[in-house]
Structure formats: structure tokens, C-alpha cells
Amino acid sequence: MSAIYRNMTTENRSGLLFSLRRAVFTFGLAFFVILSDMLVIHLGGVTTLHGLIEQTIILGLGLYFAYTGIAIFGTEIRF
């Protein structure tokens, strides 16, 4: 039983759908963009810590799903 579970977790970790490195990169990039907008540009209207966290989660998830789609389907997506 544990060998099957270990094999499944290894496949999930090495698969294209879940990537901790991709998640850290995209959420870090999202946090940097929202924080710089909050402190310098004021385009997004984020003024509180709650708004910063909320917008970081929204933008981070969007970037993560976009990079995951590119990782799964490749860069040559044709419609």
C-alpha cells in the first residue's frame, strides 16, 4: 500500500501539472508587481494589506495556470 502511495506522490511531484518552483516564481512575481503598483504607480487602487494579499492571490493563480498551460501544451498553441 505504501509503495503505491509513494509512486503516486513521485509522479505528482515530477508531473507537469504541479510544480513548486513554478508556484513560487509566479506568486513572487505577482507579489512584486502588486507591491510596486501599491507603492509607486497606484494604478490598481490597492491601499491595504488585505487588498495586497487578495490581488497577489488572484494574479498569482492566473499566472500559475497560464504557465501550467504552457508547460502542458507547449509554446506552440494553435487555435
Image (cartoon, helix red, strand yellow):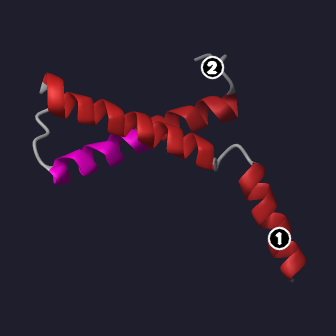
Q: Give the residue drawn at x 17%, y 34%.
A: 38
Q: Amino acid at mark 1?
A: Arg
Say which residue label 1 marks.
Answer: 6
**Can residue 43 be seen here?**
no
Quadrant the C terminus occupies: top right
Quadrant the N terminus occupies: bottom right
Query: Which element carries disc 2, helix, strand or loop?
Result: loop
Q: Give the residue drawn at x 65%, y 20%.
A: 75
Q: Is residue 55 left or right of residue 63?
A: left
Circle 1 or circle 2, nearest the eye: 1
Tell me if residue 33 is in the magenta stretch. no
Say which residue label 2 marks.
Answer: 77
Residue 49: x, y in percent?
18, 51
Residue 50: x, y in percent?
18, 54
Residue 7: x, y in percent?
85, 66
Number of residues whose C-alpha sits closer than 10 Å to that of mark 2, classed few (under 14), some (14–19) or many (20 or more)? few
Residue 65: x, y in percent?
51, 40
The residues colored magenta run 49-61
Gap between marks 1 and 2, in whole Å?
33 Å
